[in-house]
Image (spheres, rainbow, N blue to C red):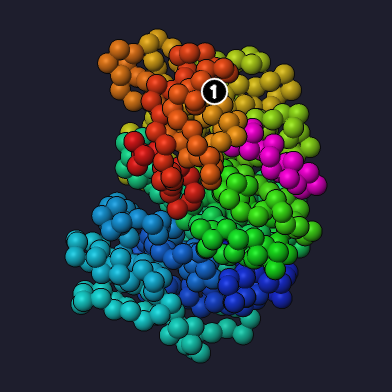
Amino acid sequence: MIISDILNKTAAVFPDNTAVIYLDESITYKQLNSKVSRLAEFLKKQSYPDDARIGVFFENSIDYIVAYFAVLRAGYVVIPLDTSLHEEKLNKILHDSNISTLCVGFKFQRLFKKLYTLNHPVKEIISEKEFKLKDDSITYRSFIDIFNDQVIEPESGLNLLNWDDAKQAPHELAAIFYTSGSTGEAKGVMLSHKNLISNTIGTNEYLKLTEKDSVMVILPFYYIYGNSLLLTHISTGGTLVIDNRFMYAETILDTMQNEKVTGLSGVPSNFMILLNKSTLTERNFPNLRYFTQAGGAMAPDVIRKLHDAFPDKEIYIMYGQTEASPRVTWLPPEKLLEKLGSIGIEVKGVDVKILKEDGTETSTDETGEIVVGGDSIMLGYWNQPEEQSAVLKDGWLYTGDLAKRDKDGYIYIVGRKKEIIKSGGNRISVKEVEETLLTNQKIHEVAVFGVEDDIFGEAVKAVIVLKENEIADDKEIQKFIRSILPEFKVPKYIDFVDILPKTQAGKIDKKQLK
């Protein structure tokens, strides 16, 4: 099975189910599959090499989903691109991946006008609307022309392509997701069909997803967590409810109620905003079955607050990495309070070891690095053999995350290898300091990191966002944390800001903050 088979088979089983709701638009699986087939057939008729890499540069929408599956159905490699990138960073990725064809949202035409003042490898643009830049070397196509071409439009969309002649095999490269490397430069994570499908199956199983489920999509599809929402719901015949207006949190909550979604997935900052700066806890969601959280550790105090507000909903705490397609562990909701702070147990089909520096496995409650194996582990990094060899060894992914297991086998993250502050001979976990600060009822968000210090080598710095109408100074916060943690873990420097910089996926951007 390859990824495009997921949509094809779901359209055969649930043709009239609603696949996507996006603002005032909706589309059934039969209609979605037909659009994908028509665009895929168009792509197949072009003179692309067999290993062509085609970029998708849309915000979350029906058109994004059509382009994503069409590239794969045509037998090429899809590269979802971060729509928040500036032209210089985007251009680096275009050159690194050698993308010659781009499916581009019309709203991004200004960005591409800037991009085309630079040297670039793009030779063809396909957009949902006509737009043309002053560059005669670029061929322009529109979805409208492709979809209105009656010559290639099939009646059902199910039999347009000969699946036995698919260019790709399960073990072959399907997608490249670009993520930040240790140097701050983007690195392309190469994932095969088998990687993504095996992880989708494992995730579907523990979430108990069916064709009756619908998820509120606030995470971008180019982000691996968002991509997981896309594949899990398409594979089960569920519904993706897309709303890109998270900055207006009340609008998202209205959409959740109006569309009667059964699931909401987010990163920690999403939940902190909803809990602290919206009417989430004042509303009723009778159809909502579950929350899922990943994309970084969520402080136990925030988890407890979410649970207290919604004791009848299932809360899934999850852990993963792009390099693992992405899901590695999950915490069963019935264990949430008993194992508060844990990332849970292995996803089906995933193997997890916690290794000491000498390569041997740790004992109970002993700290080591999380090392992951199984069918979901990436093929490697695109064009970055040194980065690849540092984390991929004999088929095992060395995550850089430090953790320990309790006596029942549940895993607890201690911190990142690269987020351990070494101050005056002491090792300080950034995660521990952040979680402690978040127990202060005046604090909305916090980011902790190490800064250079003439005496101790490194010192702890905290950047804090207070809740509305709260007032505090550095001495008050230091006194608070000193009452809980030893002196060497107390932040030496504290800044107060109105907002923390974030990536479009909602993660705190510490590189920019520093």
Where is residue 438? Give x, y as percent: 56, 33
Q: Which residue is mark 1?
A: 480
Is 314 a magenta residue? yes
Looking at this view, is 466 or 432 the one in front? 466
Magenta-tinted stretch: 298-315
Residue farthest top in this picture: 425
Looking at this view, is 47 or 454 the one in front? 454
Q: Which quadrant would residue 214 be assigned to in this image?
A: bottom right
Where is residue 32? Give x, y as percent: 59, 74
**Residue drawn at point x = 73 percent, y = 45 percent:** 309
**Amino acid residing under circle 1:** Phe
Please state, as top left, top right, bottom left or bottom right, where the C terminus lies in the image.
Answer: top left
Where is residue 35? Give x, y as percent: 54, 77
**Residue drawn at point x = 53 percent, y = 45 percent:** 468
Please state, as top left, top right, bottom left or bottom right, where the N terminus lies in the image.
Answer: bottom right
Residue 101 visible in this rendered orientation of the protein? yes
Is 26 a magenta residue? no
Residue farthest bottom in this picture: 150
Where is residue 114? Give x, y as percent: 24, 65
